[in-house]
Image (tube, rainbow, N blue to C red):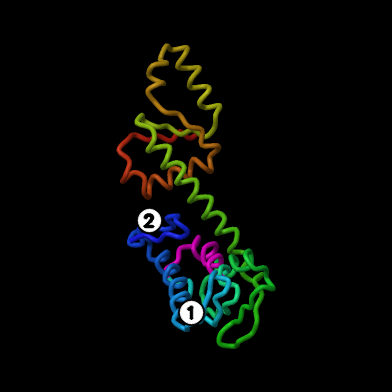
Amino acid sequence: MSIIINEVQWISNIFQLSTGQSSLLNIALSILRDFDMSGAKFETLADVKGVVIIDEVDAHLNPDLQCNVLPALLEIFPKVQFILTTHSPLFLLGMKAKFGEDGFHVLELPSGNRISIEEFEEFQSAFEYYQDSSTFRRKIEAELEKSKKPVIFFEGDYDIKYLKKAASLLGEEDLLNSIELYDSKGFGDLDKIWKSFDNKLSSVLQKIVGLIYD
């Protein structure tokens, strides 16, 4: 079952959505269903009005869905008042990025005292690191899948230059050409590759992968 909007396929198969994605889709469709059942007429999502109360709105959502997608979902219903509970600082940071700190209120329970988003700013750097690491891992996985040769990662491009020079002097260019050489841009990223490979990549990639540390 797919969802098509304005003749464009928005979701190819709803049964392939993750639990978090399904949860967000359910929120959006429930709002539309209930408003439609009220008998009110609407042409766009901006016409939908009402009050929506959701307990633990961040449940089952990964960090990206909490910080980026959920606030974007709330934004498409500008005339709906949302009353939400959450345990997620990332969701609050995403709300601040989307609506500004004055665009919504955060109350601490059970006291009901208003609190500032600044109390959660420390989580922003952790989330950015998570995003960078995830993007980096996906890039490495794509490169490894694309290549059928053994792959060796080095700390820097000079290591590759020295190796190519040595292969030329020793007459081993053919041997070197049978291997994919990658510059990992430093010790830190080389270490990320190792941690990613140690956790996941080794179970899905049927090839030799080497990491050369200085």
Residue 4 in the image: above or below residue 213? below
Residue 16 in the image: above or below residue 29? above
Residue 17 in the image: above or below residue 163? below
- Residue 201 or 159: which is nearer the viewer? 201
Q: Secondary structure at mark 2?
A: loop
First in sequence: mark 1 vs mark 2: 2
Measured as percent of width and height from the top left, residue 7 is found at 44, 56
Amino acid on which disc 2 is placed = Ser
User: Count the marks: how many?
Assistant: 2
Q: Mark 1 or 2, which is nearer the eye?
A: 1
From the image, give the main secondary structure of the stretch colored magenta: helix
Where does label 1 land, which residue? Answer: 35
Residue under the point 59% across and 88% down:
111
Residue under the point 45% across and 68% down:
24
Reply yes or no: does residue 190 show up in magenta: no
Measured as percent of width and height from the top left, residue 11 is found at 41, 58
Please state if 25 lies on the left or on the right of 119 as rendered: left
- Residue 35 or 59: which is nearer the viewer? 35
Label 1: how many Cα within 10 Å (few below 14, some 14–19, many 20+): some
| Mark-to-mark CA distance, 1 and 2 | 25 Å
Reply yes or no: does residue 72 show up in magenta: yes
Determine the image quadrant of residue 96: bottom right
Where does label 2 land, which residue? Answer: 12
Measured as percent of width and height from the top left, residue 54 is found at 48, 79
- Circles 1 and 2: CB distance less than 8 Å? no
Write down the region rendered in magenta: 60-74
Q: Secondary structure at mark 1?
A: helix
Pick the quarter of the image with the N terminus.
Answer: bottom left
Residue under the point 42% across and 59% down:
4
